[in-house]
């Protein structure tokens, strides 16, 4: 079993005045969260969107798993929401400059906050940045 915390920090999920949703990771990486024809998508975007309403905020972990008994071997984004983390699966990772749009799978699975933080902490892996 192996896992690597690619990044961690604070996030904010908000809507703009048009009802479009955006998630900002670490205060600097912004993504539009849109409903595609077949599944939700994250699309890389700038940070110049006006917040109309904050939907969620808290800690996030962006993690890659390998041969892990609890999580599939694809990148996961965990967003803190109250006393648990929402699990988002990113089969092809987060959007990049060369590939600005990626599919997102919103899992119905949530993980208790203390359980996920202990699980990730027990791995003794650190974030790249």
Image: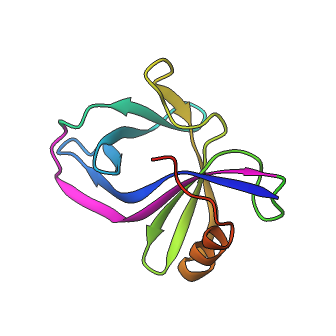
Residue 35 to residue 98: above or below: below
Q: Position of residue 16 (x, y in %)?
A: 21, 45
Number of disc labels: 0
Residue 42, position in %: x, y?
46, 37
Quarter of the rendering containing residue 93: top right
Above or below, 41 against 76 in this view is above
Residue 4 placement, left or right of 30: right
Q: Whole-percent x and y of residue 60?
A: 45, 60
Quadrant of the rendered image containing residue 80: bottom left
Task: Give how far across and how far down residue 123 sits, in percent.
Answer: 69, 66
What segment carries the magenta color? 49-66
In this rendering, is residue 123 above or below 72?
A: below
What colouring method underlies this structural image? rainbow
Q: Residue furthest top?
A: 98
Q: Is residue 59 magenta?
A: yes
Frontmost residue, 82 versus 7:
7
- The structure residue drawn at horizontal position 67% and vertical position 39%, both measured from the top left corner, is 91
Q: Residue at x 45, y 47 (%)?
A: 129
Judged left or right of residue 48, residue 23 is right
Magenta span main SS: strand
Residue 49 horizontal side relative to residue 128, left or right: left
- At x 51%, y 33%, the residue is 36
10 lies left or right of 73: left
Viewer-side residue, 6 vs 98:
6
Residue drawn at x 34%, y 64% as measured from the top left: 56
The answer to whether residue 86 is magenta is no
- The quarter of the rendered structure image containing the N terminus is bottom right
């Amino acid at each position: 079993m192996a896992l690597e915390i690619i990044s961690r920090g604070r996030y904010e999920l908000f809507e703009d005045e048009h009802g479009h949703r955006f998630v900002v990771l670490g205060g600097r990486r912004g993504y539009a969260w849109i409903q595609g024809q077949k599944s939700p998508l994250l699309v890389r975007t700038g940070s110049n969107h006006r917040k109309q309403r904050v939907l969620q905020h808290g800690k996030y972990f962006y993690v890659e798993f390998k041969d892990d008994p609890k999580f599939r071997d694809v990148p996961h984004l965990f967003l803190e929401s109250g006393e648990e983390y929402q699990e988002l699966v990113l089969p092809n990772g987060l959007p990049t400059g060369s590939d600005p749009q990626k599919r997102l799978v919103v899992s119905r699975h949530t993980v208790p906050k203390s359980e996920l933080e202990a699980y990730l902490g027990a791995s003794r892996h650190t974030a790249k940045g």
